[in-house]
Amino acid sequence: MIENSVFIRNISPLANKDSVLEIFSDIKEEILTVEFHRYPNSEQKFCQIFFKSSNGVTKSTAYNGSTLLGVPMSITVLPPVQINNYEQNKITSNKEVFVKGVPKNYSDWKIISLFELDGEVPIKITRIENSTPFKMNLIIEFMNETTTQKLLELKNIYTDDGDLIEISNTYSSNSLQNNNNDIDYNGTINNNMSLLSSSNIVSTTPVYGTPSKSNAASSIVRVLSNNSNKTNVVSSTSNYNPTSENASIDLSNISVPLAYQQIKKVEWDNKLSKLFEIKKKIENRILNTDSKVKDEFCSSSCGYSNKDFSRRRSLSRSLSPVL
């Protein structure tokens, strides 16, 4: 839809909705929404601004040539390329990244840990069917666009085992297979997808909501916080193990960063417990060694003392006068 909208053809890669609204602050009330699109087979993007009426379109043309984050804007009413809201090879949200090559045996917890950046963790993980038997593709969503941009700048990351994981804002359609279900934040089925053209979702784990059925397991963690995100209560089943590959996520009504911190705290407490255990064993070994050395020293000293006493006694007898 291009009615009552304009396009910014050349736009800074760092531009986001807030920066666009800031430039158009004088006519902000005329703006309905701001969307970003990718040029085909390119990392570059262009912006589409929707207005309430043609009046907003007319006013926006006055900004043609103005700079947005140091880049002069070219504003036009015609789209640079044909736009399809359900086109393939496009990540429509600036808060999402496409990830390729994640080991299939990675649990949601491990994925969250892998993509933690500056304290920010994923809030939604969408698994996409991959033709590779041991690797999977993901679409990962974060709370803010800054984290996404930093990941895109990295381009690649490596797992602990040295596996290469590629990060981009586009994906290849030949890596997808048909699947009709998508699970949104509330765990409900949504067949009218706005993210992918052919509904290729295998499973989606909304970190705020109920986990995908395919990832369900007996170990469940619930981390609850109040609206201020200052008070946290962590409860778990007796079988809970945050490092387990089979651990599932059920984080209803929670703050994700705080939940993740709680999990890391549990892991750290476990590590400290093991360290104290090792320390205790070492101390016991040292004590046992000291005791053994003391016993040997004592027995040796006592032996020499008895020999000296016998020698002195014998000598005293030999020197005694004969009466």
Image: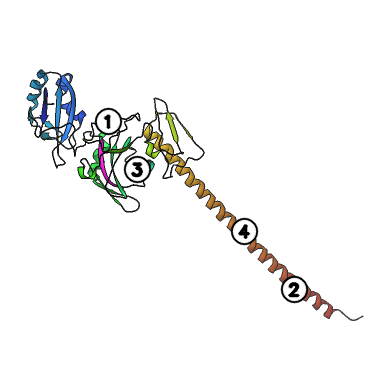
- Specify the quadrant that holds the N terminus: top left
| Cβ–Cβ under 8 Å for marks 2 and 1 | no
Q: Residue at x 46, y 42 (%)?
A: 241
Residue wearing tag 1: 191
Task: Please report whichever mark, 1 or 4, sits nearer to the chain's N-terminal start.
Answer: 1
Mark 1 closeness class: few <14, some 14–19, many ≥20 residues within 10 Å: few
Residue for badge 3: 111
Q: Amino acid under label 1?
A: Asn
C-alpha distance separating marks 2 and 3: 73 Å
The answer to whether 103 is drawn above or below residue 39 in the figure is below
| Three-letter code for the amino acid on which mark 4 is drawn | Asn
> What secondary structure is marked by label 2?
helix
Q: Which residues are magenta?
A: 84-101
Q: Nearer the viewer, mark 1 or mark 4?
A: 1
Frontmost of labels 2 and 1 is 1
Contact? badges 2 and 4 (CB < 8 Å): no
Q: Nearer the viewer, mark 2 or mark 4?
A: 4
